[in-house]
Image: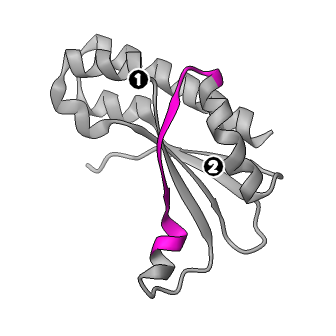
Amino acid sequence: MPSVVVIHLQTSARSFAEVCDRLPAACQAEGYGVLAQHNVGETLRAKGLDYSGQCIVFEICQPAHAAAILQADASLASALPCRIAVSQQGSEPVSLSMLSPEQLLRAASSKEAIQRIGAQVQQETLRIMELVAH
């Protein structure tokens, strides 16, 4: 039986640029840092693909959470860092999205410590999305 992937989605009336500009400060307010930004829209267009939307994926990390996850199970390194995508298609509202950190870690490990961290990360990253969107 295939598992269901939960994607958290938050829309914003703010402009695409404003949402992207607000994300680092919202991350910092929750103790996270932005490790990288990937402009997926630009990359696709640079490769000659017909993509008219805007999409930037932000890799974010809260170092204490990452260290605790790696201490408990180093094989979970591929689940790090968290990612929040900011995207917009045409005149549609800007959206922020992320795969559920809690669900991903729960599916990957039965260790209580990992599941507890996953739940905390999810609460914090949902707060980041809310801060950015409004």
* Residue 125 horizontal side relative to residue 101, left or right: right
Judge from the rendering whether residue 1 lies leftward or rightward of residue 39; answer left or right.
left
Magenta-highlighted residues: 29-43
Q: Is residue 130 magenta?
A: no
Question: Which residue is depicted at the point 82% across and 52% down?
Answer: 14
Describe residue 3's horizontal placement relative to residue 9 as left or right.
left
Q: Which residue is mark 2?
A: 96
For marks 1 and 2 on the same chain, the one whose residue lies earlier in the sequence: 2
Q: Is residue 23 visible?
A: yes
Quadrant containing the C terminus in the rendered view: top right
Task: Give the x, y percent position of residue 19.
Answer: 72, 49
Q: Please name the residue that numbered disc 1 is placed on.
A: 118
On the image, which quarter does residue 104 sit in?
top left
* Mark linked to residue 63: none
Q: At numbered mark 1, what does the secondary structure look like: helix, strand or loop?
A: helix
Mark 1 neighbour class, 10 Å CA radius: few under 14, some 14 to 19, many 20 or more? many
What is the distance, in whole Å, between disc 1 and disc 2 at their CAs? 19 Å
Which of these two is toward me, 93 or 65? 65
Q: Position of residue 118 (x, y in %)?
A: 40, 23
Q: Is residue 20 left or right of residue 32?
A: right
**Residue 107 or 63: which is nearer the viewer?**
63
